[in-house]
Amino acid sequence: MKPYFAGLVSAWALLTVGMVGSAGAETQSNIDDAPANPLQTPNARPQGTYKFIDPGLPTYDGDGVSAAVSNVIYLNNCKPNGCAITPGNENAMTNRSTIPEQPSTVTPFAYSDANWAQVVDCVKATYAPFGVQIVTERPATGNYHMAIVAGRPGDVGMQNGVGGVSPFSCGYIPNAISFSFANIYGGSVDDVCWTVAQETAHSWGLDHKFDNKDPMTYLQSGPSRKSFQNMAGSCGEFSARACQCGGSTMNSFQAIMQMFGSSTPTPPTVAITAPKSGDIVPQGFAIRADIMDDIGASKAELRIDGTLVATLTAAPWVFNAPMNLGQGNHTIKVTGFDIGNSPADASVTVSIGSPCTKPADCSNDTDTCVDGRCVAGSGVDGGLGDVCANSAECASGQCGNDGEGNAYCVEACDPAKDACPSGFGCIVAGTGGVCWPGAGEGGGCSSNNEGAGLSLFGLGLGALLITRRRRRS
Ligand SMILES: [Zn+2]
């Protein structure tokens, strides 16, 4: 911890001592490397700090500059000639800053353009949930925050060991300039990204957080790539303390959300590259998907015949189908999510062996036929129509409940085909359908009787409340 003001050190230390007794009572899950002695500073990593400025200063309304919050963050790498900064009240548009005490030049970002592009992508990903715009060209008009991502602390009169610095008040500082001293991090994208996230957020009033997953942390444990945590926790550097701006906890995610709102969802594009629709596939076949997103894909879910069977949280987006998948047609759906959790999906229909049209087509005598695929039939434990209490009891992984005390193992089906076995009808459930005992006898699914609630308990889906059409009579 190498804060800018010597006076702050003792203020923090006092707060720290005062907080020790209560820190243990809080839920703090992300503090693995917090030292036993809270005044000890175990860090080797250069730490970002902040410099209090007086929010009453004319920086808020001087120069005819609007005091409005701007959602534009301009990342400036100071290539190729460095950034000339003059001391004075914050004004990103004229390169004027409260940080240096004399005219200074920040040396350019020392690494390749490819490395810079990775830093920019990481900062975009870190801020993806929020309604901000990250740009790398100086905006021609309007207010903005300028994040200088270049140079070394000595360039603006800071001591060695300072990884970054930002002006700080307990709110948004319009037109502020933050500094992330990229050239001391040896080209480490995650370290620079973490510092940029922390310094920019200081400029909108966020304190340090005692949470090793959050970019506002000083702790080196936890993931190297930090993300703003949607979880209230103590402020603090190497131990929990009260927050500089009041209160005992901070939720950095919610604080930024309050400042900027949420981002406009930009769902990824999802394509299943293998197998192709109509393919005959072997047991355990591989499923490959491409998930493209402007910022980054974060998750992929595989559903087979409507049941969630696997989730991946990193590329490559390659799954294997379960080995127990029955003979016949199967619908493969991959849902991809971006970092902001916007979903998109793609589906293909494949066949293991030949599709069935009737139960007798299935090689297993106890199987029945639904939409061209052989599934565990009635009379088999967990088979179609068996009474169930939860989804794990069903071969299909889906226990349907109509809310009237009836719960049966169901199979996904296409209501348009209504190709459930005799004694079952395909009723609308969620975005598809399920085979339900006794439904649609004689009338298919076309009756328009009153709806009743049917809950589907799919694997990992929680309860999906849907409406089914009640059979006649
Ligand atoms: Zn900091």
Image (cartoon, helix red, strand yellow):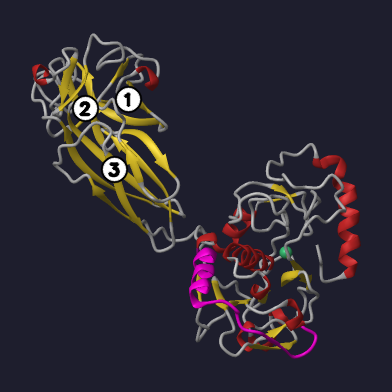
Q: Does the magenta segment cover residue 122?
A: yes
Seen at 44% across and 62% down, the residue is 295
Mark 3: give few (<14), some (14-19) or many (20+) Cα within 10 Å: some
Asked which secondary structure carries label 2, the reply is strand
Magenta residues, as a range? 100-124
Asked which secondary structure carries label 3, the reply is strand
**Image quadrant of ligand 1?**
bottom right
* Contact, mark 1 vs mark 2 (Cβ under 8 Å): yes
* Res. 287 mark: 3
Q: Is residue 202 left or right of residue 143?
A: right
Seen at 86% across and 58% down, the residue is 12
- The residue lying toward the viewer, choosing from 453 and 354, is 354
Q: Earlier in the sequence, mark 1 or mark 3?
A: 3
Q: Is residue 180 visible?
A: no
Say above or below: 284 vs 106.
Answer: above
Q: Earlier in the sequence, mark 1 or mark 2?
A: 2
> Disc 3 and disc 2: Cα gap in Å?
29 Å
Q: Is residue 395 left or right of residue 471?
A: right
Quadrant where the image shows the C terminus: top left
- The residue lying toward the viewer, choosing from 4 and 365, is 365
For disc 2, the marked residue is: 427
Say above or below: 459 vs 68.
Answer: above
* Res. 454 mark: 1
Seen at 47% across and 60% down, the residue is 263
> Disc 1 and disc 2: Cα gap in Å?
10 Å
User: What amino acid type should be assigned to the residue bearing mark 1?
Assistant: Leu
Asked which secondary structure carries label 1, the reply is strand
